[in-house]
Structure formats: structure tokens, C-alpha cells
Amino acid sequence: METSTEKTQEAKKNKAKEYLKGWVPYRIKRYWVYAAATMVAIIIPWITVGGNHLFLLSFDQKKLHLAGVAFDMQELYLMPFLLMLLFLGIFAVTAVGGRAWCGWACPQTIFRVIYRDGIETKLLGLRKRIKNKQQEPDMSKAENKVKKVIAVLLWSVLAFIAAANFLWYFVPPEDFFQYIQNPDEHMMLIGFLLGIAGFLIVDVIFIKEDFCVYVCPYSRVQSVLYDDDTVMAVYDPVRGGEIYQGHGQGRQKLFTKQKELQAVAPTAECTTCESCVTVCPTHIDIRKGLQLECINCLECVDACTQVMGALGKPSLVQWSSEKETLRHEGKTNYLRPKVIAYFVVLTLVLVALFAMGSKKEHMLLNVNKTTRLYKILDDGVVENDYLFLFANTDSKKHTYTFEIVGNDKIEIERPKEPFELAAGQKRKKVVVLKTSHMLANDMRKDVPIPVKIKAYAVDDKENIIVERDTVFVYPRADLIKK
């Protein structure tokens, strides 16, 4: 017959199994998010819509491709909206979910997981367990040295792929692979490829999480964006017990064993197993409270959930807010004014981006006056010279011409005929405007006469048309020969 002790232990096991039933560690969820983010990052540069990329900032072609629409560099008024979306988006995510970007989407974190957990631990066995990130491999063994070299070589290959993937957002893949076949002609591209790959190798293998702790400015910015309702990894000192005393960097550890803790706080549930400490990639103890080094990877939540779950109890470390878990002052308020304000501004910026993007001009025209203000001919005709820069930003060839609007006293001397521009082509035109009329009678100074230029595609006048304002400089009256 089973003793009462055996029955109790069996009951605890059943309770633990029931508690952990269906539980999926955050680490596994993060891996799925990493896989999705990686696939998206790799696939986006290859997607084209009507010959234009989904996103491409090409310095070579001097164009921005956004959602299948190509914008010339002169149309980069969209860039501030994209930057606002990026920064406001990160700020909004931080206000709601802490450093969720760092733990769940940052390339630095993804690369470290691939190298440390994937290559070093799972593939080569250089590290013994994923759950122990504090203990570095013993490099005194010859076997481990060989494994380390293999790990570095494997990551170096992946680093070059990641560097190439990054460059595809600036040099489209179809051009990239042509350029690297002729390295002598594209040394700058090769230099960027080698430089980025080299940085990734040094960063991921040698700098490691020190980049997150000491280099990345985001950890300092987050402290300004956090509030009492920001969701993060939080240790519950009410249930678990106060392991540390003091504040800031001067916190002192009080207990290292459960017996010591329970002697002071009998109801404290922390087992002092330090699973939450050994699993932390940035080497912090979450029981100290909020720390800048925490990247919200939630590895500590997984570790504590498994330990406390075996006892049939909820985790002492939760993905929650200080308000809810640390001070027990009520539920987390997700829809607070600051968060609503962030998303309202984000929506307005997104609407403005689409509104501005929908007004794309399919031709560009820059009108510049030459250094010579005017030329006076013997018959009293006055000429002004201009330099027009035309650009066909449409996806097909068009025939262009232009005319003067609202002033029949000024006419076009040259060019006389329309001209063709292929898709994406630019052309400079020397334009001469003239007048035989007396436009002004000022004996003291030259007079600028406003002129409106209307340029359009002859074959698509309804849709491809732009207007530009310039001036026709008419000389002093005493300079005109009668």
C-alpha cells in the first residue's frame, strides 16, 4: 500500500502536470517570432510590384521604392514620415511592452540566439544547456577549441548572408549579384559587405550581450518611456520574498538559501534555485527589480514557471507591470492616455504618409535660371535663358512638352519640338524664352515678371502634368534699343 508521503508526492506531481499542461515557454514563442521576422526580412527585397520593389532605398538609382511605387530622390519628403513611424512605433511598443523589441525582434538578439543556442549549444554541444547562459565553455580542452573554430566559421557564413540581406534594402538583389561579380568596379559595395559582415562576427562572438548593456542607447531611452503600467519581466517580492535590500546599484543580497529566507519570511515562496539568474543572457538577477540590462526575453519567466509549476504554484516572475505584480495595486491599464496618444499620432502619420504617397508626380521638373539674367537683341527682343531638368518617374516611355500659362506676351524660342524620355530617364534642356513686348517701363532697375510653366506628357496629358513658377527678368527701360 502507498504511504501517505507517497500519496502526497503523487498528488503534487499530478497538480504540477495539470498546472503545466498546455504551457508553451516564451522561448519557443520567441523562436517562432524570430523565424517569421527572418523570413520577412529575407523575402521583402525580392518582392516587386509592377517592376518596383516593396521597399528599397537605392543610392545607386537615387530612388525610394515604397509599396511598389518608385519615388525620385527629389520626392523624399516621405522619408520624415517613415522615420516618424519607426521611432514612434518603437516608443509605443516600449510604453506598452517594455523592451519587447529587444527580446523579440532585434537582429542582435536573434543573431545571438542563432549562434549561442543554435550553433554552440544544439549543433556542436560546446555549451551544455540552453538554460545555463552564465557558464562559458571550457576552452582549455582541445575538443572545445576545435568546436569553437567550427562555430566561428559557421557564423561567419551566416554573417555574410545577413550582411548581404541588409544591403539588398539599398542595392536590389538583381543588381547586387551582378555587382559582386565585378568587384573591381564596385569596391564600395564590397567594402560595405566585408565591413558589415566583420562587425556581425565580432559583435555576436566577442561583444555578445555587452552590446545591449553598454553600447545600445535604447536601454537608456527606455527608462524615460516606462511607467507603472509598462509590461515587463517582474519578480513578485510579496509572494517570493525580498531577496535584496536597498535601491539602484547598491542593492545588497540578503539570502542565498531558502532556509535563510524562510527564517525571516516564513511565507516566502522563492526556492532560491536561481534558475532565473543562470538563464539570463544579460547576466542579471531579475529579483533585484527593474534593470536597464533586461531585454524582456522572458527567459526568467520560463525558468520560474517550470520550477514553481513543479510545486503546483504560479511563477514568481511574470510578464506583467510593476503596478500589478510588484505593488499589487490593481490590474495593468493597457489603454492609458499615453498609449492612446502614441497610437493616435501613429495613425495620423500613417494617414499622412499614404496621402503624400498617393500624390506622386509621374514626371519631375526643376527650373533653374542661368547666370545670364537676359539678352537684348538688336530689334529690342529680350531673351531669358533657363536650364530645365526633366525626369520621367513613370514606368513607361512618354513624350513631353511644355507651355507658358497666362502670359501671351512671352513665348518659347527653344526648344520647338516635343521630346521623348524612357522610363526613369532624366534629361537637361536649355530653354530660351523671349518677348518683343514692353513688359515694364522702369528706368531704375530690372523688373522680374512672374511666369508659370506647364509641362505635360503629350500621350497622357490628363494624368502626367506639373506646373512650376519662375521669373522672366525684363531689363531697365534705358537698356532697350528703340
Image (cartoon, rainbow, N blue to C red):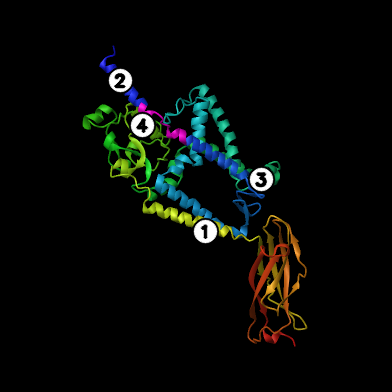
The numbered dot on residue 352 is 1
Q: Position of residue 94 (x, y in %)?
A: 42, 47
Graded by Cα atoms within 10 Å as few (under 14), some (14 to 19) or many (20 or more), the crowding at tag 2 reads few
Graded by Cα atoms within 10 Å as few (under 14), some (14 to 19) or many (20 or more), the crowding at tag 1 reads some
Badge 1 element: helix
- Residue 220 visible? The answer is no
59 left or right, relative to 182? left
| Of the two numbered discs 2 and 3 in the rendering, the one whose residue sits closer to the viewer | 2
CA distance for labels 3 and 1: 39 Å
Graded by Cα atoms within 10 Å as few (under 14), some (14 to 19) or many (20 or more), the crowding at tag 3 reads few
- Residue 50 visible? The answer is yes
> Residue tagged by mark 4?
304
Q: Is residue 37 above or below residue 470?
A: above
CA distance for labels 4 and 3: 51 Å
The numbered dot on residue 9 is 2
Instruction: Tell which of 5 and 425 is nearer to you.
Output: 5
Q: Position of residue 339 (x, y in %)?
A: 40, 51
**Which three-letter amino acid code belongs to the residue tagged 3?**
Met
**Which three-letter amino acid code belongs to the residue tagged 4?**
Cys
Which region shows up in magenta? 18-29
